[in-house]
Image: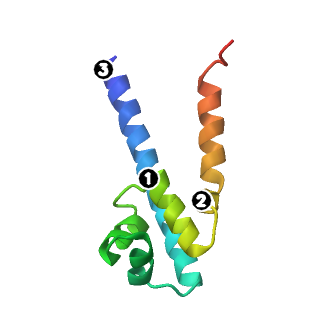
Amino acid sequence: MQDSRYNSAVKEEVRIIKINKEIGLRIKHLREERKISQSALGEIIGVSYQQVQKYEKGITPITVERLQQIAEALGLAPADFLGNKFEEAVRERSDRYEPVK
């Protein structure tokens, strides 16, 4: 029983890491597309270029508030960074739980 819960927790952590990396890559791509440097983006949102780099590499998870700031700085909506991942996560979770009656 313990192994099963441990394996589930590890799988969930791996899934979260993958999502963070995918969001980070989208931020990098969209930032570069707009020809904005990491330093400039960092200045706009109030962090160092090193922190922007960590977001883009998926090392540091991005809060919803920070994602909103990045989106505004790039002239986008936060959902533009999530792509299909948000829809997949909602669908996956809704399949696991019974609706509240």
Q: CA distance from mark 1 to mark 3?
A: 31 Å
Q: Position of residue 36 (x, y in %)?
A: 50, 84
Q: Quadrant of residue 78?
A: bottom right
**Which quadrant of the figure contains the N terminus?**
top left
Place of residue 37 in the rendered image (x, y in percent of width and height, measured from the top left)? 44, 85
Question: Where is residue 14 drawn, in percent x and y?
Answer: 40, 46
SS class of the residue under badge 1? loop
Nearer the observer, 89 or 45: 45
Mark sitting earlier along the chain (1/3): 3
Comparing 95 with 6, the one in front is 95
Q: Does dot 2 land on a helix, a strand or a loop? A: loop
Q: Which mark is residue 2?
A: 3
Q: Amino acid under label 2?
A: Pro
User: Between marks 2 and 1, how big is the CA–CA gap?
Assistant: 11 Å
Q: Which residue is mark 1?
A: 63
Question: Which quadrant of the structure image shows residue 80?
Answer: bottom right
Give residue 40's mark: none
Disc 2 versus disc 3: distance between alpha carbons?
37 Å
Number of residues whose C-alpha sits closer than 10 Å to that of mark 2, classed few (under 14), some (14–19) or many (20 or more): some
Name the residue rendered at 60%, 51% in the picture: 85
Q: Which mark is residue 78?
A: 2
Nearer the N terminus, badge 2 or badge 3? Answer: 3
Q: Residue at x 44, y 75 (%)?
A: 44
* Labels 2 and 1: the sequence-earlier one: 1
Given residues 15 and 30, the one toward you in this image is: 30
1 vs 3, front mark = 1
Asked whether the residues under the numbered discs 2 and 3 touch, taking CB atoms below 8 Å apart as contact, a structural biologist would say no
